[in-house]
Image (cartoon, grey):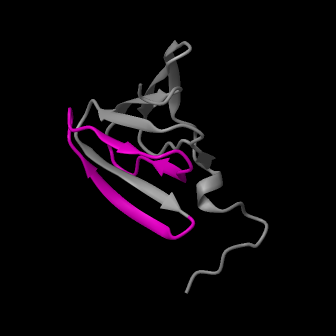
């Protein structure tokens, strides 16, 4: 059994941040491209808006929530949506870069 020094930060505090590039931010939408080098993460966050994710690559991302962790297989071009209030950290545990585009809706559908 390996005993860790209690002064070491938890493993998730050692990760680098994924690169977020805001492409559009207007009255209706915020569109952000997320690029995850291997081992990077978003950091814990809460979504204040409903959103859609469009994977640009195929692979697996780890989702950490208050309820635990899961590994999610994503396919390029296969979108999914989540409601406002989602709280999590997203991690790329794989050996390759992973890219997705996140589209946040600032106004309810008309």
For this view, does 75 lie left or right of residue 109? left
Regarding residue 98, the answer to whether it shows in the image is no
**Which residue extends farthest right?**
7
Q: Is residue 40 above or below residue 9?
A: above
Which residue is at a point 59% across and 56% down the rendered structure image?
A: 12
Q: Position of residue 43 (x, y in %)?
A: 60, 45
Q: Which residues are magenta?
A: 66-95
Is residue 106 a member of the stretch shown in magenta? Answer: no
Residues 48 and 8: in front is 48
Q: Position of residue 9 (x, y in %)?
A: 71, 60
Which residue is at a point 50% across and 18% down the rendered structure image?
A: 28
Regarding residue 110, the answer to whether it shows in the image is yes
Residues 7 and 21: in front is 21
Residues 92 and 104: in front is 104
- Quarter of the image for the N terminus: give it: bottom right
The answer to which quarter of the image holds residue 66 is bottom right
Which residue is at a point 66% across and 62% down the rendered structure image?
A: 10
Q: Is residue 101 above or below residue 17?
A: above
Q: Position of residue 19 (x, y in %)?
A: 51, 28
Q: Is residue 87 above or below residue 103?
A: below
Q: Position of residue 15 (x, y in %)?
A: 58, 47
Is residue 78 a member of the stretch shown in magenta? Answer: yes
């Amino acid at each position: 059994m390996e005993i860790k020094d209690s002064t070491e930060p938890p493993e998730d505090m050692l990760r680098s941040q994924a690169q977020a590039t805001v492409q559009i931010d207007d009255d209706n939408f915020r569109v952000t491209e997320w690029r995850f080098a291997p081992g990077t993460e978003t950091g814990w966050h809460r979504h204040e808006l409903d959103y859609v994710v469009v994977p640009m690559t195929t692979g697996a991302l780890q989702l950490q929530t208050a309820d635990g962790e899961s590994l999610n297989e994503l396919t390029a071009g296969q979108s999914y949506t989540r409601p406002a209030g989602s709280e999590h950290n997203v991690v790329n545990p794989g050996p390759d870069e992973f890219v997705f585009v996140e589209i946040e809706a600032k106004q309810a559908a008309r």
